Image (cartoon, grey):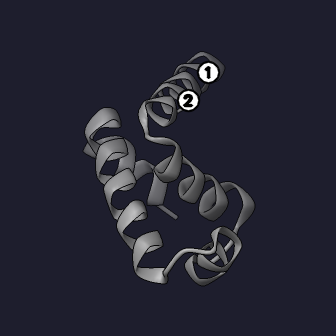
Amino acid sequence: TSAAAADRDAQVREAMRALGEDQRDVVRMAFFVGMTQVEIAEALDVPLGTVKSRMRLALGRLRSALGDEFAEELFDD
């Protein structure tokens, strides 16, 4: 339903706000802009390993904030 979708959107926005700026940036660039981790590293002028670490930490925090069921729904094709 649209109410459920609006609630889910609000949860995602709140979870994203709780991330640090560095983590939030890599998530936005990957999921909303569609950049690869290599492209993100080049755009931010940081090592690829830094991008990978930020992404791993951010996704872990999002999973904790949103729950495993949300993560499964997010990645379900």
Please rate how many residues cluster around mark 1, counting C-alpha atoms within 10 Å: few if below 14, some from 14 to 19, many from 20.
few
Above or below, 41 against 68 in this view is: below
Locate residue 64 relative to residue 28 in the image: left or right. left
Q: Nearer the viewer, residue 67 or 57?
A: 57
Dividing the picture into quarters, in which one does residue 37 lie?
bottom right
Q: Amino acid at mark 2?
A: Arg
Q: Which mark is residue 24?
A: none
Give the image location of residue 15, x and y in percent. 44, 32
- Residue drawn at the location 39% of the way across and 52% of the way down: 58
**Residue 8 horizontal/vertical position (percent):** 51, 28
Of badges 2 and 1, the one in the foreground is 2
Structural distance between the alpha carbons of marks 2 and 1: 11 Å
The amino acid sitting under disc 1 is: Ala
- What residue sits 47% from the left and 51% below the top? 23
28 left or right of 59 in image: right
Give the class, few, some or many, for how many residues have Cα within 10 Å of label 2's Cα (few <14, many ≥20). few
Instruction: Name the residue at 42% across, 62% down.
Output: 55
What x and y, as percent, mark residue 43?
A: 70, 72
Considering the numbered disc 2 on the image, is that residue within a helix, a strand or a loop? helix
Pointer 2: what residue? 13
Of all residues, the one furthest to the top in this rendering is 3
- Left or right relative to 12: residue 71: left
- Name the outermost residue toward the front: 45
Q: Is residue 38 above or below residue 68?
A: below
Q: Which residue is mark 1?
A: 6
Label 1: which secondary element: helix
In which quadrant of the rendered image does the N terminus lie? top right
Depth check, front residue: 66 or 24: 24
When the figure is inspected, residue 41 is found, relative to residue 55, above or below; the finding is below
